[in-house]
Image: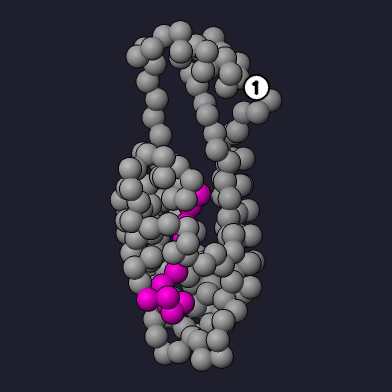
Amino acid sequence: MKDEIRPNDARRRVVKALGCGLALSPFLAMPARADWPADKVIRMIVPFSAGGATDLLGRALAAELGKGLKQSVIVENRAGAGGSVGAQAVASSPADGYTLLLASGSMFTVNQFIYSKLPYSLADFSPIGKVANGPMVVTVNANLPVKNTRELIEYARARPGKLSFSSAGVGS
């Protein structure tokens, strides 16, 4: 398949995304007020488990922000509910710029459709910037007689309950 992603390509994309995020970090760290940052720790909430891609990006970004600001920036993992637990923690924090959220798209797009009520809304946040992106990939067993997404959907609809799938988690 032409659109096939090889493991080395995926690694290159992650490294490239990390590099872009780090390159943008000085622009993200520009203070909004003359007295910010004070001698106060900046918390970056990563709404997913430690060790995953978002956590690794958050830790690299926090290290660079800390260097640029000459300020402590700590990463705090608040996993759960497709990022909603971390988002709620930031939404309920004081709006003083000392609690940041390393958000993913699912927290503001997918979650509103899979949870009856979210404890936050997009209006609770002030976006700073984009630090990374990654491809969304659908793969299938090579023996499955489908060649594209449309064929996969048709195949699954014709066989309700016969296929299984896996993902990084609900809402991801």
- Prevailing SS of the magenta stretch: loop
Q: Residue 108: x percent and y percent? A: 47, 50
Of 100 and 62, the residue lying toward us:
100
> Residue at position x 47%, y 62% from top?
123
Q: Is residue 75 above or below residue 157?
A: below
- In the rendered structure, does residue 9 fall within the stretch colored magenta? no
Q: Residue 117: x percent and y percent? A: 33, 48
Q: Which residue is mark 1?
A: 1
Q: Which part of the image, by quadrant, shows the N terminus?
A: top right
Q: Residue 49: x percent and y percent? A: 34, 53
Q: Is residue 63 above or below residue 55?
A: below
Residue at the far right in the pictured view: 2
Q: Residues within 10 Å of mark 1 (few under 14, many from 20)?
A: few
Q: Which part of the image, by quadrant, shows the C terminus?
A: top left
Q: Is residue 103 above or below residue 43?
A: above
Q: Is residue 111 above or below residue 19?
A: above
Q: Quadrant of residue 64?
A: bottom right
- In the rendered structure, does residue 100 fall within the stretch colored magenta? yes
Of 9 and 35, the residue lying toward us:
35
> Residue at position x 34%, y 60% from top?
88
> Residue at position x 50%, y 87% from top?
36
Q: Which residues are magenta?
A: 94-105
Look at the image and tell me whether residue 64 can be seen: yes
> Residue at position x 62%, y 40% from top?
9
Compared across the picture, whether 49 is left or right of 68 comes to: left
What amino acid is found at the position of numbered circle 1 in the picture?
A: Met
